[in-house]
Image (tube, helix red, strand yellow):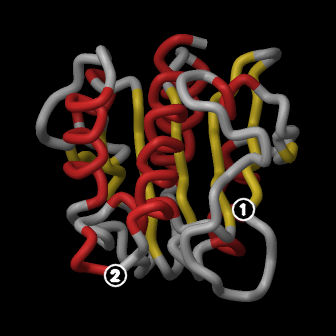
């Protein structure tokens, strides 16, 4: 599990405890074997392809270089997975950059019966809502290579905030639990699809 460092001015490093706390929850509540620590890599780093799961988040602008566009396309077409979790404010730039990566693909909203929502825990109503921003329902969008989900984009739900230590955002225990369970689903689905 690797956090993606990206350019453009966005805070790729936001929610610094989110992945470590999610990984701890996975180790304590499932039989999935994961590291205690997240990896961190840019798209142009040599060891990128040693990871199969990239996570990215942030509030601001996302910008990939031409070289990074080519690398990310190859990374995803080889069978790897990217989960982008909008921490509020990266929507426009992330969609723009993914259109550069896959000009002929469009995001598709995942229906509630998609296996992602039922891979480990059952989420009959889709993504949990962690934080309120614009009064919109949480949505999960995907980019597919044939039937395989390559990119998951979680929007208007702020999963990463719910993964962090409870003291950071003061989320109620039940909301935090749902966010962590959804994180389990995403990782479990990405590794087993």
In the figure, residue 148 lies in which quadrant?
top right
Q: Residue at x 50, y 81 (%)?
A: 60
Q: Where is residue 106 in the image (x, y as percent from the top left)?
A: 86, 45
In the figure, residue 136 lies in which quadrant?
bottom right
Q: Which mark is residue 191?
A: none
Whether residue 188 is situated above or below residue 180 in the rendered picture: above
Whether residue 79 is situated above or below residue 25 in the rendered picture: above
Q: Which residue is drawn at 60% across and 22% down?
A: 119
Quadrant containing the N terminus is top left
> Is residue 47 visible to the viewer in this orientation of the structure?
no
Q: Which residue lies furthest to the left in this view?
A: 36
Q: Mark 1 points at which residue?
A: 95
Q: Which residue is drawn at 29% across and 40% down?
A: 2
The one nearer the camera, 170 or 133, is 170
| Label 1 CA crowd tier, 10 Å (few <14, some 14–19, many 20+) | some
Q: Position of residue 171 (x, y in %)?
A: 41, 75
Instruction: Give whichever of discs 2 and 1 has the lower sequence position.
Output: 1
Q: How far apart are marks 2 and 1 (CA)?
A: 30 Å
In the figure, residue 18 lies in which quadrant?
bottom left
In the figure, is residue 128 to the left or right of 20?
right
> Is residue 122 visible to the viewer in this orientation of the structure?
yes
Q: Is mark 2 on a helix, strand or loop?
A: loop
Q: How many marks?
A: 2
The one nearer the camera, 69 or 93, is 93
| Label 2 CA crowd tier, 10 Å (few <14, some 14–19, many 20+) | few
Q: Where is residue 35 in the image (x, y as percent from the top left)?
A: 16, 29
Q: Position of residue 190 (x, y in %)?
A: 53, 24
């Amino acid at each position: 599990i690797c956090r993606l460092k990206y350019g453009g001015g966005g805070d790729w490093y936001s929610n610094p405890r989110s992945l470590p706390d999610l990984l701890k929850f996975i180790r304590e509540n499932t039989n999935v074997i994961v590291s205690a620590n997240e990896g961190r890599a840019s798209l142009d780093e040599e060891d990128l392809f040693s990871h199969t799961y990239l996570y990215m988040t942030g509030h601001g602008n996302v910008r990939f270089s031409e070289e990074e566009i080519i690398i990310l396309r190859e990374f995803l077409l080889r069978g790897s997975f990217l989960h982008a979790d909008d921490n509020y404010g990266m929507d426009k730039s992330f969609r723009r950059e993914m259109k550069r990566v896959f000009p002929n693909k469009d995001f598709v909203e995942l229906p509630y019966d998609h296996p992602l929502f039922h891979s480990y825990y059952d989420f009959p109503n889709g993504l949990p809502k962690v934080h309120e921003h614009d009064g919109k329902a949480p949505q999960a969008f995907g980019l597919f290579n044939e039937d395989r989900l390559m990119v998951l984009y979680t929007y208007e739900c702020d999963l990463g905030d719910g993964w962090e230590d409870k003291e950071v955002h003061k989320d109620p225990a039940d909301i935090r639990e749902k966010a962590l369970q959804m994180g389990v689903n995403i990782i479990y689905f990405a590794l087993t699809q």
